Amino acid sequence: MRAQADAELKEKINANLSEHLSLMSSQFPSKPAFLHPDRITYRELEQEVNRYAHGLKQIGIGRNTRTILLVTPRLEFFILTFALFHIGAVPVMIDPGMGAKAMAKSLAGVEAEAFVGSHKAHLLRFLYPGAFRTVKICLTLGRRWFWSRYGLSDLQSDREDSCPPCFLNPEDSAAILFTSGSTGPSKGVIYRTSMMNSQIAILRSHFKFRPEEIDLCTFPLIGLFSLCLGLTIVLADMDMTHPASLDPKKIIANIQDNGCTQMFCSPMVLDRLARYGNESNTRLSSLKRVITAGAPVSNQLLHSFKRLLVPEAEIYVPYGATEALPVTKISANELIQLSREDYEWDKCICLGYPLKETDVRIIAITDEPILLWDDAQQLPPNQVGEIVVKGQIVSDGYLNMPEADAIAKIKDSRNDGVWHRTGDLAQMDSSGRLWFFGRKSQRVITSDGTLFTIPCEFIFNQHPRVFRSALVGVPIGVTGQIKPVLCVQMEPDDPGGNQQKLVQELLAMGAANPQTRCIREILFPGQFPVDPRHNAKIFREKLTLWAARRIK
């Protein structure tokens, strides 16, 4: 059965994504696609997608219709998304956690023709009408107010005849997914049909996604891919757009009550679960596999969460970006083993090994565009540079953003390919592993040399009272000379007393290391500003502005 499924999946590598769902429905018709909070089988899910596809076509949404989708990640979200895929429309997905103004600014360049969302989401069109001037078709979930001609009931027709999936070529646009905007304006990434199918194949081959698994979904995109591979989904009882607000007790109950065998989540979610689980002596015996990504993951966190799992359970820590996902993979066991060794780069974060489907290189650091690959300066192992990646899982451009394309894309004339510049700095060791040094835009260039955020912050993060730290560079005086400043966020349960003593201890730690010796200013901003999607990437640019107001 599995060999047959592999063969059929390979044949559909460039197919419409809804066909994966049809394949799973034919193989596992009575198997639950969702267990919680709604229970629905794969056959029932496919039937709902078919009905919605009919309805969407009847109201004027069809092939290539860019459709903004602002729907709570519940059952209706997945049905609507697959229905849009089915008819060849292009769903546009953006993180509401970035705020209304930022969303409107990002969506203004999409030139969408349709808008599907809750009645609350539709308020965005009235607050920022200019950003949605091209929208002609509006569909509201829930209460239908005067602004929307169509409601969800208009899609739920009684038609049971099959709605054939729209034929898509590999290079056709399948979706537009916006970046988190954690290090600059959010950008709409063009996902080709072949790109999304390649990502699905990689989840199966490298991360062992199997139909017999029960997946706790904390991130909608991975949930969509899990359904394409026949897994049963448990939707986490949390606001996926604001993960910091989660109640760890509820998430642990989701896992235990439904026997979840695998989970994808951000390091922030993993940290919340680990803290609560260890305090309450909780064990998550059903989990066989955990994948955590979206921000750097400390070995301390991996140690902490592993205590909740059975010994044979695996934790994977892949690296990637919205434009290229996933790029590398490594297991927690290997990361922990590396931390026990006196490794040359033990103060950096290991991103793991590039997947065989990707071509990963390190190029010299520059903030300038690189038009052609022949103009890029490739670096040998053991030198810090920017990570660039090429392969089927790599997006070839942004939507209507030529300036962003110029900065982030390099054309390879030899095979008509495109390299994506990740904006991340790393070294590659002799074993082919990548070691992360921080974002290129966040490096601090001083008169004493360049400081990279990750290895510098590692030094100070060893203090037991420090939850996390962030290195920023503050311009001083009329000359604009850059002064390195360390911002520190205390552990959540720290009483906050005797701060002066903590400063002295941190300065002593910095002075003992050559790369942090020049850091002589430490500030405490309280809670760090972080990205809304993973609630883990630090907005160092905002901290820089905050620190500049306090440094004379």
Image (spheres, rainbow, N blue to C red):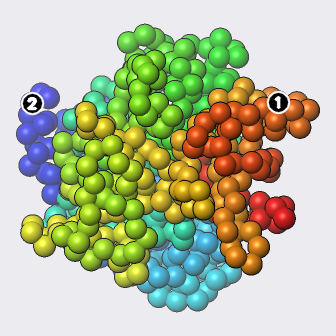
Q: Residue at x 52, y 89 (%)?
A: 133
Q: Tell me how far mark 1 sits from mark 2, CA to CA.
A: 54 Å
Instruction: Point out residue 431 in the picture as x, y percentages from the top left corner.
Output: 25, 33
Q: Secondary structure at mark 2?
A: helix
Q: Is residue 26 visible?
A: yes
Q: Quadrant of the C terminus?
A: bottom right
Q: Residue at x 44, y 79 (%)?
A: 110
The three-letter amino acid code for the residue at tag 2 is Ala
Q: Residue at x 59, y 56 (%)?
A: 448
The residue indicated by pointer 1 is: 494
The three-letter amino acid code for the residue at tag 1 is Asp
Depicted 318 relative to depicted 442: above or below = above
Front disc: 1 or 2: 1
Instruction: Point out residue 221 in the picture as x, y percentages from the top left corner.
Output: 41, 50
Query: Crowding near pointer 1: few (<14 within 10 Å), some, many (20+)?
Result: few
Q: Is residue 213 left or right of residue 448?
A: left
Give residue 493's quadrant in the image: top right
Query: Crowding near pointer 2: few (<14 within 10 Å), some, many (20+)?
Result: few
